Image (cartoon, helix red, strand yellow):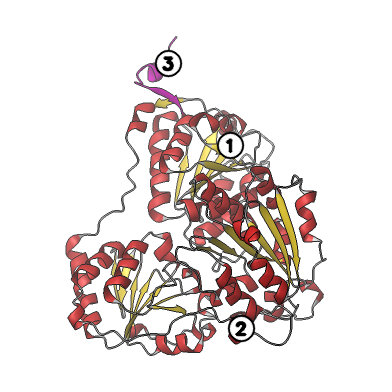
Amino acid sequence: MADIRTSSLKSPIDVAEYLFTRLHQIGVRSVHGVPGDFNLVALDYIPQVGLKWVGNCNELNAGYAADGYARVNGMAAIVTTFGVGELSTVNAIAGAYSEHVPVVHIVGTPSTISQNDGKLLHHTLGNGDFNVFADMNREITCAMAKLTCPDDAVSLIDYALQQCWIQSRPVYITLPTDIVKKKVEGERLKTPIDLHFPANEQARENYCVDVVMKYLHEAKNPIILVDACAIRHRVLDEVHDLVEKTKLPVFVTPMGKGAVNETHENFGGVYAGEGSQPDVKERVEASDLILTVGAIKSDFNTAGFSYKTSQLNTIDFHSTHITVRYSEYPGVHMRGVLRKVIQQVDLNRLSTVAGPRMSNKVKENEDDSETITQAWFWPRVGQFLKENDIVITETGTANFGIWETRFPKGVTAISQVLWGSIGYSVGACQGACLAARDAGSDRRTILFVGDGSFQLTVQELSTMIRLGLKPIIFVICNEGYTIERFIHGMDATYNDIQPWHCKDLVNAFGAKHGESRTYQIRTKEQTNELFEDKQFSSANVLQFVELYIPKKDAPRALKLTAEASAHNNAE
């Protein structure tokens, strides 16, 4: 006898096909994850809708890779299995939530019948509670869709994907084994999910704009400070237009690296309180009005809460509210306000005072030694980079050293300054590099990771080789956890690691002859020769560089931040 519900559908389609088709419509082209018995049937649908399955070495790495993919592509998806798989990726999903990265986490679960009967299944806690893992994920996702019935499955899917995009945070979707092939209405796929950002209530927005304009026109020395959420909540067009029209000095925070064109004549550098270059610190802290866009004032983003700015001189633009001095305007998104500020600013009433110009200070950091130093290396990296490169830096020396690198135009910077999970960057490199290839671009993907962090997630090098990706990977060999040494335990054995022959892992993981190149760099001369090598610069194969820097050398900003962190830990 025909299913009455199914027979009424105009274009019956399986739930899994609907879900993966929606992901394809939004722009996802590759799906990360690890197979498990509760998601296997669902995985069969991935190639059917034009998606590619990545297949990572473990779920944590898959989560990091999905994060990196989303930062380049706009959104990402990961599939794990119930319990053991989803919990392995929780750290990565929490990091994506913390740093406002839109990742769709799809979890294959036991059948609804097994769940309702409370069966004693594998991958459970043995107590019949099938909601416990979803409850764990609830605090690190902005929306949940438990697909327990085909009647509301498409609505739940569409809502979750919409919120993932709009809120720029992870969502969690459970797909029971007996729901995968249930039929839903495919006609709905003809109508794209509405991904437009909700407009502000006009009266409230206009009032907020009037207040902003009052203080902006009165200011004698205003500047713009751009942070991570300007990137995550997609207001970079507004930021660029604001800089172009006003000609105000513009700075970025560490998490805001790559948000603006760093070759622009008004770009002054990275502001992070005491971690800033002296001329940047002086200029920002002398301003009588700071327009901050998408601020995340965390400890590492502010060099240990060392800002010397006053809220009385600050206007904060956020995705959920605007704060003008000490007055908050909730429910007002920065996009609409910024656009009207750009339209209404009176250049005849705007005071502009020139700021510093950032440059890659290589000569200023040269010495008589051939030893590679952190102070010399990072400005030198700035000379090696090209327009539109993707640059990934690991929590540690790389995250802080990159502050001293002036980027060419169009560079995308990926780091995890707020969440700070070591090992993140290796997985993120795989995801970012894949996203660039999926987009059909020839952008180079360049990773800087310490030897300690590299050991946590090294398996993703294998995934990069299997996928035929061509990143440039620099492993900074400095004998362990340098950032931890400067926080506490400079010579403690817990900050040491077993040295690896890192570059040999490329062959150990099965790279074919002619599809990779490896290097070992120990001197400034060797670094210069490498950076000037046209073959190396072309990035036409996967390239792996062991870069040796002294154990107790660290970027200036890291030393200052570590000292502040140690002080905060002791309070």
Query: Which one is in front, 385 or 350?
Result: 385
Is residue 238 within the magenta segment?
Answer: no
Question: Residues at badges 1 and 3 in contact (C-beta under 8 Å)?
Answer: no
Q: Earlier in the sequence, mark 2 or mark 3?
A: 3
Of the residues shown, which amino acid type is indicated by label 3?
A: Asp
Distance of label 1 from label 2 (alpha carbons): 48 Å
- Helix, strand or loop for disc 2: helix
Q: Is residue 565 left or right of residue 508?
A: left
Q: Which residues are magenta?
A: 1-14
Badge 1: how crowded within 10 Å, few (<14), some, or many (20+)? many
Question: Residues at badges 1 and 2 in contact (C-beta under 8 Å)?
Answer: no
- In the rendered structure, find residue 3 and report the number of the disc placed on it: 3
How many numbered circles are shown?
3
- In the rendered structure, find residue 517 and report the number of the disc placed on it: none
Is residue 2 within the magenta segment?
Answer: yes
Which residue carries the number 1 mark? 109
Q: Earlier in the sequence, mark 1 or mark 2?
A: 1
Which residue carries the number 2 mark? 556
Badge 2: how crowded within 10 Å, few (<14), some, or many (20+)? some
Residue 147: percent from left, percent from top: 47, 36
Quadrant of the rendered image containing residue 209: bottom left
Q: Is residue 90 left or right of residue 185?
A: right
Quadrant of the rendered image containing residue 232: bottom left
Residue 199: percent from left, percent from top: 25, 56
Mark nearest the camera among 2 and 3 is 2
Q: Residue furthest top?
A: 1
